[in-house]
Amino acid sequence: MSQALQHDNSDVTAYVVDVARAARTASAAMARATTAQKNRALHAIAAAIEAAHEDIFAANRADLERARAQGLEAALLDRLELTPARHQAMAAGVREVADLADPIGAISDLDYRPSGIQVGRMRVPLGVVGIIYESRPNVTADAAALCLKSGNAAILRGGSEARDSNQAIAACVRAGLQAAGLPGDAVQVLETTDRAAVGILLAQAEYVDVIVPRGGKGLIERVSREARMPVIKHLDGVCHVFLDDDADDDKAYRIALNAKTQRYGTCNTMETLLATPAAAARVFPRLFAAYRAAGVELRGCERTRALDGDVAAAGEDDWYEEYLAPILAVRVVDDLDQALEHIRRYGSQHTDAIVTENYPRARRFLAECDSSSVMVNASTRFADGFEYGLGAEIGISTDKFHARGPVGLEGLTSQKWIVLGDGHVRE
Amino acid sequence: MSQALQHDNSDVTAYVVDVARAARTASAAMARATTAQKNRALHAIAAAIEAAHEDIFAANRADLERARAQGLEAALLDRLELTPARHQAMAAGVREVADLADPIGAISDLDYRPSGIQVGRMRVPLGVVGIIYESRPNVTADAAALCLKSGNAAILRGGSEARDSNQAIAACVRAGLQAAGLPGDAVQVLETTDRAAVGILLAQAEYVDVIVPRGGKGLIERVSREARMPVIKHLDGVCHVFLDDDADDDKAYRIALNAKTQRYGTCNTMETLLATPAAAARVFPRLFAAYRAAGVELRGCERTRALDGDVAAAGEDDWYEEYLAPILAVRVVDDLDQALEHIRRYGSQHTDAIVTENYPRARRFLAECDSSSVMVNASTRFADGFEYGLGAEIGISTDKFHARGPVGLEGLTSQKWIVLGDGHVRE
C-alpha cells in the first residue's frame, strides 16, 4: 500500500469514527426530545426543503450532468433525478411523518404482579441508525424523517452519484433540527464518497446500533457480510399467487393480473403464479390473454403448456427467479399442500397470496405460509408500508429477528421494562 | 494439521450440519403444531423426567464423579448437581411452561385500511433456536420447554461436564415429543463434546435462526464474535440504585439493602449505590451498619468517606465492576442529572432504580435511564422473567435489537403480516 493511500484511509477512518461518535452523543438528546419538538423539526425540515428548491435543483443538475458524463444508464438517471413533483413529494413525505403517532415513551401492558410491583414496557429508540442507500436522493429526507420521529440519531450514506443532491437536502435537515432546538448532528450525511467509508461505518458497532441497507442485492449482501451490528435487510422478493380450486374466477383474474402488471420492478410483484388444475383450466385462458396484451412473457411447467401451447418451457431456475420484469413463471400444482411446498422450496419468504373462497384452506394458508406477508384474496402489491398504515417504511425486512416485512417507525424502536413499586423488595 | 485431526473435524462438521438440517426440517412441523399438541408434549416430558429419576440421578452421579476427578471447583460442582429438589423443580418448570398462553398464531391489530383490505400481524416462531450453556443440567429441560411452546425447534449444546445428565434429560424430551406426535428431532442435544462443535454450530446461519448463549462472559463474547446469525445475549449487570433527595428513608434502606444482599451472584444485584448528599446523610449510617452486619465490603468516593471514615476508597475501576460478590461501590452525586450521567458512563444498561417520592424526577428517571429495566421504588432484584410474569426466561438481553431485558416465550417469536381481502387489487 502506498503512503498516500494509507494516509487517505486513516483520514477516512478518523472522519467516519468522528461522525459515529457525534451521532451517539446526539442520540441521547434525540431520545429525550418531546413529540412537539420532533414535529417542529419535521415541519421546519419540510419548509426548508421547499425554500431551498433552487439549491436542491442546482445540486441535482450537477449530479445528473456528472452521471451523464460518466455514462450512467437511463434507469439510474431516472432514479437520480429530482423533478418538481418529486421535490414536492419529498417535503410532503416529511410532513406525513410529523402526522404519525410518536411511538416513543408509549407504555404497554402495565400490570400488577403478585409481588405488588407494576411491570410494563416502554417503547424506546434503538439509538443510532445507519442507512446505506443508492441513487434516489429522496431517501435522504425520508430516512432522516423516520429516524428523527422515532427518537434515533441517523448516519446516512448515499450513493456517490447523488452526492450534491444529498448534501443540499442534508443542509435542510440540519437547519430544521436546529430550528427546533435539536442537535444538528442527529442526522449526518457522510460527506466523503470514498468507498472505504462504508466498511468503516459497518465496523462501528460501539456507536451504531443497526444498519439498514437500501439498494441492490450486491449492496445488501456486502452489508450483511461486513456489518458488526444488526442489519434490517431485504433480500429477494420471489412472490407467489396461488389460485385454489375454490378461487372465484373473477377475483383470481384481477388479483393475478394486478400482482404481476401493476408494476414490474418492485419486490412485491408476483414472479410465479401457481394454480390447481381446475383453477388453471377456468382462469388461465382469459388471464393469459391479458398478460399477453400487457406484454408479459410466460414460462410454464408441462401442465401449463398442455393448456396453452404458446407458453415457453420454464426451467428449474425460473422458479427461483426474481425477474423484476414483464416475465412470469407459471406452474400447475395438485393442491394447497403442493403449493405450500413450492413456496417453501423456491420462495423468498417475502409475500405470498392465496385466492380462494374456501375457509379452511384460507386459514391453513395464513397459518402455514412462512412469509413476511401472507394474503388471502388480495394482490401481493399491497405489501408496502403505506398500504399497511405504517405511514412510511425505512425498508422491508426478509428476516424474522426483530422485524418482518415493511418496517416503519416501530421497527426503529425497542421496548424496555419499567417497574413501579412503593418500597418493594424481593423476598 | 494431521490427517487424524482433519478426519475428526470433518466428522464433527458433518454431524453438526446433520443436526442443524434435521432441526430445520422439524421446525416446520413445530410451527404447525397445535397448542394442545405442544402442551401434551410438555406434560409427557415432565412425566418422563419424573419416571426416569433413577437414570437421571445415575447419569448425574457419573458427571459429578468425573468432575470431581478433574478437580472442578465447588461452585461448579454445586451447579452441576441434580438434587431431588432440583429434579422435581425441573419437571414442575416444564409443566409451568405448559400452563403459559401459547403465543403462536395470535393475531393483533387487525384493522381495515382505506383500500378496503384488513391488515394485521400474526405471531410466528423464529424457526430454529440454538442454545449454548454451561454446567446446569436443568437448563436442558427449561430451554427445551420454552422453545417447544413457542413453536421452534431447538439445538442444545450443554457443557461437557454435564454430558451424561443432559443426555438422560434429552431422552425424556424426545420421548415426550414423540408421545405427542411431534418430531423427536424438534429438540436435539448435541452428543459430541468436541469443542469444535460450537464453532460449527455458530456458522449454520442457513439452518439456525438465533443463538442464545447462557453462561459466563467468556462464552458470551466468543458466541457474539463468531455467530453468523443473531444472538440474544446478556453481558454485564452493573446495576445501580439511586437515592434521591426526596427518597423515603425507610424505602431507601430496604431497597438498597435488598438489592445488594438478597443474592450476591446474580446479574440484577446492585453493584453501585448512588445518593444525593442529603439522602446519603440520612440513610447511609443505618444502611452501612446493615451492610457490615451482612459482611458487605464498602468502597466509596471521597464524599462517602467523609460521611463514614471506615469505607475504603473506590478507584475508577470500581464504578465499572460487576462484583458478583459482597462488595459494593458507593458514590455521592449532586443530583439526578449526575446520577443519570454516572449510570450512562459506567453502567451496563441492565437494571437501574431510583428511590424517590418526587413525581417529576421519577418520571424523568423512567424516561431517560437507558437500561433494559428501569425501576422506581423497587429492588433491582425484581428484574427476572418469573417476577415479570413471563413464566420463565430463555435469557436476559442487554441488547436493544429484537428484545431487551428478560426474554420469555415472546422473545422466541416474530410477527408476520397478514392481509385479508375479497378480490382487492392495488390501483
Image (tube, coloured by chain):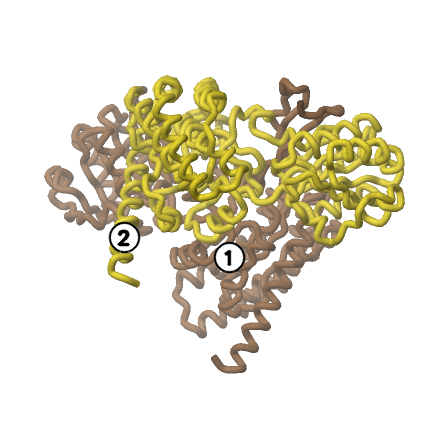
Chain colours: A brown, B yellow
Subunit ID for the residue under disc 1:
A
Q: Nearer the viewer, residue A219 or A259?
A: A219
The x and y percentages for residue B131 are: 43, 39
Residue kind at label 1, given as amino acid type = Ile
Contact flag, marks 2 and 1 (Cβ < 8 Å): no
Answer above or below: position of B150 versus A99: above
Marks 2, 1: nearer the viewer: 2
State the residue lying farthest toward the bottom: A3
Answer above or below: position of B181 versus B312: above
Residue kind at label 2, given as amino acid type = Asp
The x and y percentages for residue A140 are: 56, 55
The x and y percentages for residue B220 are: 50, 46
Subunit ID for the residue under disc 2:
B
Q: Where does label 2 land, which residue?
A: B8
Q: Nearer the viewer, residue A176 or B365?
A: B365
Q: Secondary structure at mark 2?
A: helix
Q: Disc 2 versus disc 1: distance between alpha carbons?
A: 43 Å
Q: Secondary structure at mark 1?
A: strand
Crowd around label 2: few <14 · some 14–19 · many ≥20 (10 Å)? some
Query: In this view of the protein, can residue B425 be seen by the observer?
Result: no
Q: Where does label 1 land, which residue?
A: A132
Q: Residue at x 49, y 66 (%)?
A: A161
Q: Nearer the viewer, residue B376 or B86?
A: B86
Answer above or below: position of B170 versus B398: above
Crowd around label 1: few <14 · some 14–19 · many ≥20 (10 Å)? many
Q: Residue at x 29, y 29 (%)?
A: B184
Answer above or below: position of A10 versus A263: below
